[in-house]
Image (cartoon, coloured by chain):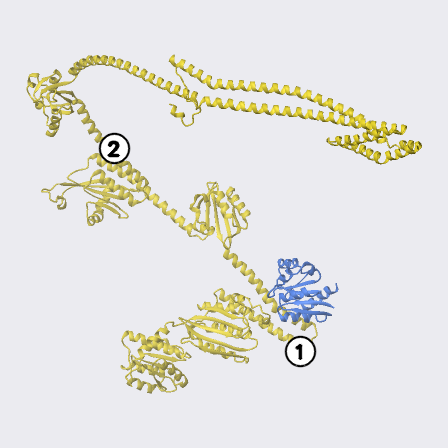
Chain colours: A yellow, B blue
């Protein structure tokens, strides 16, 4: 126990010793200090009083001496006695020595002054006065002497004497003070000493009290606890924190108490246990006795209520009770000595008995239900318990069977199971039927419906073969049949089945089995074919169900059930038909609504969207209509109005229409600003059903296009007005000036020129404007021809030959220039472009026109080296009335429509037109047109390949030499050998001798023989009739002859020579393909 | 001598106006487009400016928009235009033109109006 405190153990003795020692030292120090202090202050006062006494004495001495001096001086003066003089000198010396004595004290300022005065007096008196006085005395000059003494030389002395009196008095006072102080101090010291002794006394009292508390109180507490402990009361003590002897004592006591208490509790517990054990054994004894009684009564009850049979270990019955006999109907004598096997029913397997025997022979109790047979052969069920009797070694020597007759229960149980099974079957069927009905109700598709019916009938009535079909649609389902057979049934028997069904609603046919049905069976048997119908509302057969039962029949109630079902199905079928019709109607309606260009929206009287169409979604750019929240009034109104300029009016319009109950129609126009501004015409009308409002229809029509056209029209009218009024102003103005004012002749001429020019401009403007208007509205009629662009360009260039300052030339880089075009319009384009080039090259210069093939297009470029066009203005040049803002163009005076017209024309020809320009360098206008024969380039290549080996002969029969040469050049270039003939007769002769790939024939000849004659001859001759002929003539086509002579191609002069080679290469290719090409002999 | 500016992009019309006014004792200046007109008006003190409505670079209205009210109050402005609708005329007036002449116009009438303006 003590070990706990070992580390920081503090002895109680040591502790109190330390306290007392500290106190003693403290008091000694204080007392010593006090004594020293008292001694010192007393001493000080003593010393001071001594000094005062000495000083007083010294001053008294000085006074005495001074009085002596004065006395002796007067004596001398009066008596002129030498003795007196001598005494005077002695006293003067004495004064000197007294002064020196006085000087040794520490002097105050006043005392120092006094001393100095006396010294001065001494010096003055010794050195001046006395010798002077002596001399006066010797001379007996008392007059002077009296004067001298009256001069006040003695005043210092008198002051001093006076002061001496005062000083003495003060010293006396001070001395008295000090004496009083000493007395007071000693009184004070007495009080100090008293207080000090009281403090010591108190301190010791406190220490004693502390010691008492630290030691006596815990001891008292312990002794009290001890008393309690002795009296057996519970003691609760905590471990002490103290680390001294008392602490150890306390803690030891606490430990001890704890141990004592624990031991005591243990004892009490053990005691209680013993007591309860005693009680228990008493109770057990009672229970055992009770058991005995119960067992006895139970045995009796058992014997009366149960069947008991006891066998020996061999299984021979040695005892049965009356109940057993009664149950089994055997007599006791019949049973004793037999095995229970006489009761065996055959219900249980031998394994069952084997298991039972294993159990009981090993000493286990067996429980189970056993079926036996009574003597009369009826069933006897036992709920049996077989208990083996075992000896000490655990070997069974006797078995007792206790059986309760449960025969009745068993029978009831059996019946119950049977009826449960039946119920289950009925339930299943009902469920199936319910499900079927449910499916029927929710099936809105005829085929699915048919399938359901078919499956239901088959599962419910177990047909061997069956088919169901729709009479109109001929859709069907079948089972147990081949497909061919199925359609055979449907079609072949229709004449019989349908009318009979109409009449009888259903029927069946009993027939002998056919070979398929017999299969491997040995004999024929009967089959039944049943026919049922589903009727529509007009009592026409909608569907037929035909089914076969082999070797079995449908019971009467089954047939009734099927008939009932068929009636039900008729109704359901009618419903489907109706549904399909309404569905079709709805789809049709929705399709109509969706395909309308206008957005349509139908809202309920509460303002909720009920229906809408695709156009509305597109128009509102609304993808989230599927989200139902958009259908709520506030949401869609907010959405529909939010981008509108006329937001408030539109909002008001919606709300007014929704709230209005009249059948008024209203229209509002508004604009919506999303990506671009759209103008919408909104038309609304309320819809009524029997004077009750069912909703409001809003129809949205996008009139942006109309609005734009309207705007464009207004702009155009304004522009045209300006464009027309400007030349008109000049014409009218200058005419008025001419008419109303006299003008000089040259001015008159100038004015007239202007009027003429402006009138022309006005005319051009109107013409251009009308042209453009016609083209834009699609009313312009185009006369299309296949023409070569190079020739047209040359013609146009010729028409500008009077422009001397301008050198207009064509650079032709193209192989193919044939375009399907309206010549006049293309000339108009070229004229416009060349005029522009001239206009915008005020200083003259080259205007170059070039031609290029680019893929399947012909590209024309008109290039000038004029003033050019600022880059930012290029894009607007093709717009109407847009001219280049350039001060140097202000005199040009175009209509501002030229390029717009060009664009219209070129685009009509499926071409493109564009401008490249650099300000100050010139402008290039390009346009493309599709080539007539855009494959010509490819053909040329193929053609060249063929002819690098064989050069086909072509004969040209033409009397215009220059043309003939031109054509030959062209054909030679393309790789033909050309034979020229001017005379048709000669040409024919040569054709007979030379193989020709083709002939080019003119029709007009000055000879007797004309072109047609030649052709006729050629076609009549066997060896020349297959030569392809191309007519090259200025005459119009003669369709009749062309067909008659199978003319390959008819070229109307003038045509570009390239056209000829192109035509030839084309048919040469076709001939090769058909295998009838003719090649010339090698020359 | 009174100073008049004629701003029109059509040289013929400028000639027509100046010939119409040739009997007046005035100094005539010309401008070929809106920009030139604007800078001339800013740098000179004209008594009358005859402005064409439709001009390249700056229209007659643009020119007026670029002039201070103070400047406009120091001179008379006549707008010559093909626009004859009242709504257009209203805008022209609001922009500060106090005379309005629609195309085509009579040179004699122009002369009389200008004479009247200058004598005011």
Is there any visible trace of residue A731 in the rendered image? no
Toward the viewer: A81 or A663? A81
User: In this rendering, is residue A770 above or below A230?
Assistant: below
User: Callout 2 environment at 10 Å: few (<14), some (14 to 19), or many (20+)?
Assistant: few
Looking at the image, is mark 2 or mark 1 nearer the viewer?
2
Q: Residue at x 40, y 86 (%)?
A: A961
Mark 2 falls on what kind of element? helix
| Chain letter behind tag 2 | A
Toward the viewer: A806 or A669? A806
Where is residue A282 shown, x and y percent of the image?
Answer: 24, 12
User: In this rendering, is residue B116 above or below A391?
Assistant: below
User: In this rendering, is residue A595 above or below A719?
Assistant: above
Where is residue A526 shown, x and y percent of the image?
Answer: 14, 40
Mark 1 falls on what kind of element? helix
Q: Quadrant of the C terminus of chain A?
A: bottom left
Where is residue A275 shown, x and y percent of the image?
Answer: 28, 13
| Chain letter behind tag 1 | A
Is there any visible trace of residue A756 in the rendered image? yes
User: Callout 1 environment at 10 Å: few (<14), some (14 to 19), or many (20+)?
Assistant: few
Toward the viewer: A306 or A1005? A306
Residue A7 horizontal side relative to residue A746, left or right: left
Q: Which residue is mark 1?
A: A746
Of labels 2 and 1, earlier in sequence is 2
Q: Which residue is mark 2?
A: A427
Splitting the image into 4 quarters, where does residue A321 fall?
Answer: top left
Q: Quadrant of the N terminus of chain A?
A: top left
Q: Are marks 2 and 1 in contact (CB under 8 Å)?
A: no
Where is residue A276 shown, x and y percent of the image?
Answer: 28, 14
Q: State whether discs 2 and 1 lie on one chain.
A: yes
Splitting the image into 4 quarters, where does residue A230 fall?
Answer: top left
Cα distance between the residues tagged 2 and 1: 124 Å
Toward the viewer: A644 or A735? A644
């Amino acid at each position: 126990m003590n070990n706990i405190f070992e580390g920081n153990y503090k002895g109680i003795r040591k502790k109190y010793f330390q306290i007392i020692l500290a106190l003693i030292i403290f008091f000694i120090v204080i007392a010593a200090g006090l004594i020293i202090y008292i001694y010192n202050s007393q001493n000080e006062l003593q010393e001071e009083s001594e000094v005062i006494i000495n000083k007083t004495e010294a001053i008294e001495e000085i006074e005495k001496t001074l009085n002596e001096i004065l006395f002796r001086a007067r004596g001398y003066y009066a008596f002129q006695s030498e003795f007196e003089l001598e005494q005077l000198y002695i006293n003067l010396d004495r004064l000197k020595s007294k002064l020196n004595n006085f000087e040794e004290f520490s002097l105050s300022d006043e005392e120092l002054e006094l001393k100095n005065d006396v010294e001065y007096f001494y010096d003055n008196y010794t050195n001046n006065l006395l010798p002077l006085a002596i001399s006066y005395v010797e001379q007996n000059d008392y007059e002077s002497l009296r004067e001298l003494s009256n001069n006040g030389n003695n005043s210092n002395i008198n002051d001093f004497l006076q002061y001496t009196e005062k000083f003495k008095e003060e010293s006396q006072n001070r001395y008295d003070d000090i004496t009083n102080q000493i007395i007071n101090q000693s009184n004070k010291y007495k009080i100090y000493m008293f207080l000090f002794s009281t403090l010591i006394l108190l301190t010791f009292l406190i220490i004693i009290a502390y010691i008492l508390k630290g030691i006596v109180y815990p001891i008292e507490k312990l002794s009290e606890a001890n008393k309690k402990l002795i009296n057996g009361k519970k003691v609760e003590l905590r471990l002490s924190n103290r680390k001294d002897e008392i602490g150890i004592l306390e803690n030891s006591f606490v430990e001890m108490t704890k141990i004592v208490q624990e031991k005591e509790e243990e004892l009490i517990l053990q005691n209680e246990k013993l007591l309860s054990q005693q009680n228990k054994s008493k109770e057990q004894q009672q229970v055992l006795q009770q058991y005995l009684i119960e067992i006895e009564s139970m045995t009796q009850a058992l014997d009366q209520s149960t069947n008991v049979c006891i066998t020996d270990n061999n299984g021979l019955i040695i005892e049965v009770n009356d109940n057993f006999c009664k149950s089994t109907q055997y007599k006791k004598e019949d049973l004793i000595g037999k095995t229970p096997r006489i009761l065996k029913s055959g219900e249980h397997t031998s394994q069952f008995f084997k298991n039972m025997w294993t159990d009981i022979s090993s000493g286990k109790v067996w429980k189970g239900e056993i079926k036996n047979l009574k003597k009369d052969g009826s069933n006897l069920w036992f709920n049996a318990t077989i208990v083996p009797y075992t000896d000490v070694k655990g070997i069974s020597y006797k078995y007792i069977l206790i059986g309760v007759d449960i025969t009745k229960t068993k029978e009831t149980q059996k019946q119950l199971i049977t009826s449960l099974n039946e119920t289950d079957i009925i339930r299943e069927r009902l469920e199936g039927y319910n499900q079927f009905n449910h499916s029927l109700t929710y099936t809105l598709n005829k085929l699915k419906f048919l399938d359901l019916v078919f499956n239901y009938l088959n599962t419910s009535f177990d047909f061997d073969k069956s088919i169901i079909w729709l009479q109109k649609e001929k859709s069907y389902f079948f089972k147990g049949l081949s497909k061919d057979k199925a359609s055979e049934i449907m079609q072949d028997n229709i004449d019989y089945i349908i009318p009979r069904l109409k009449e009888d609603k259903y029927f069946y046919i009993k027939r002998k089995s056919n070979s398929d049905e017999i299969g491997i069976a040995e004999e024929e048997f009967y089959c039944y074919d049943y026919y049922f119908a589903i009727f529509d509302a007009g009592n026409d057969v909608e569907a037929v169900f035909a089914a076969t039962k082999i070797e079995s029949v449908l019971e009467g109630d089954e047939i009734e059930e099927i008939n009932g079902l068929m009636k039900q199905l008729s109704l359901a079928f009618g419903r489907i038909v109706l549904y399909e019709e309404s569905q079709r109607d709805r789809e049709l309606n929705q399709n109509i609504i969706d395909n309308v260009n206008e957005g349509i929206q139908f809202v309920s009287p509460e303002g909720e969207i009920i229906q809408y169409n695709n156009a509305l979604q597109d128009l509102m750019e609304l993808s989230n209509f599927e989200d139902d929240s958009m259908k709520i009034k506030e949401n869609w109104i907010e959405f529909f109005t939010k981008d509108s300029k006329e937001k408030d009016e539109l909002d008001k319009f919606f709300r007014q229409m929704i709230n209005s109950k009249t059948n008024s129609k209203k229209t509002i126009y508004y604009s919506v600003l999303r990506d671009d501004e759209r103008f919408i015409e909104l038309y609304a009308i309320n819809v009524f059903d029997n004077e009750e409002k069912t909703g409001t229809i809003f129809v949205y029509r996008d009139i942006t296009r109309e609005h734009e056209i309207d705007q464009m029209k207004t702009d155009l009218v304004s522009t045209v007005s300006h464009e027309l009024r400007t030349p008109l102003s000049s014409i009218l103005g200058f005419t008025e000036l001419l008419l109303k004012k006299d003008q000089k002749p040259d001015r008159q001429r100038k004015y007239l020129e202007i009027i003429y020019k402006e009138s022309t401009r006005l005319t051009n403007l109107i013409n251009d404007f009308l042209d453009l208007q016609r083209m834009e509205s699609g009313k312009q009629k185009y006369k299309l021809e296949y023409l070569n662009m190079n020739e047209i360009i040359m013609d146009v260039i010729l028409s500008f030959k009077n422009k001397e300052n301008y050198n207009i030339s064509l650079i032709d880089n193209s192989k193919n220039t044939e375009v399907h075009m309206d010549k006049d319009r293309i000339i108009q384009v070229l004229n416009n472009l060349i005029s522009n080039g001239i206009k915008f090259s005020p200083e003259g210069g080259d205007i170059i026109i070039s031609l290029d093939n680019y893929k399947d297009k012909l590209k024309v470029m008109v290039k000038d080296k004029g003033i050019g066009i600022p880059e930012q203005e290029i894009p607007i040049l093709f717009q109407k009335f847009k001219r280049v803002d350039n001060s140097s163009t202000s005199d040009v005076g175009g209509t501002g429509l030229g390029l717009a017209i060009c664009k219209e024309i070129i685009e009509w020809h499926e071409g493109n037109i564009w401008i490249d320009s650099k300000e100050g360098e010139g402008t290039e206008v390009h346009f493309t047109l599709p080539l007539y024969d855009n494959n010509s380039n490819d053909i040329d290549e193929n053609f060249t390949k063929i002819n690098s080996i064989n050069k086909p002969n072509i004969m040209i029969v033409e009397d215009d030499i220059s043309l003939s040469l031109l054509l030959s050049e062209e054909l030679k270039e393309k790789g033909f050998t050309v034979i020229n003939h001017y005379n048709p007769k000669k040409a024919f002769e040569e054709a007979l001798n030379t193989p020709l790939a083709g002939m080019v024939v003119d029709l007009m000849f000055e000879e007797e023989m004309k072109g047609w004659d030649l052709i006729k001859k050629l076609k009549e001759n066997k060896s020349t009739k297959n030569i392809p002929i191309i007519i090259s003539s200025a005459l119009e086509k003669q369709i009749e002859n062309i067909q008659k002579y199978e003319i390959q191609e008819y070229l109307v002069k003038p045509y570009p020579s390239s056209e000829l080679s192109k035509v030839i290469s084309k048919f040469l290719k076709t001939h090769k393909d058909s295998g009838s090409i003719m090649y010339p002999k090698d020359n | 001598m009174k100073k008049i500016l004629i701003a029109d992009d059509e040289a013929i019309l400028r000639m027509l106006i100046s010939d119409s006014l040739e009997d007046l004792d005035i100094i005539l200046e010309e401008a070929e487009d809106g920009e030139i007109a604007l800078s001339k008006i800013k740098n000179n003190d004209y008594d009358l400016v005859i402005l064409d409505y439709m001009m390249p670079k700056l229209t007659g209205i643009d020119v007026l928009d670029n002039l201070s009210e103070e400047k406009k109050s120091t001179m008379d402005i006549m707008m010559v235009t093909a626009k004859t609708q009242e709504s257009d005329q209203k805008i022209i007036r609001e922009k500060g033109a106090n005379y309005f002449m629609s195309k085509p116009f009579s040179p004699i009438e122009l002369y009389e109006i200008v004479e009247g303006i200058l004598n005011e």
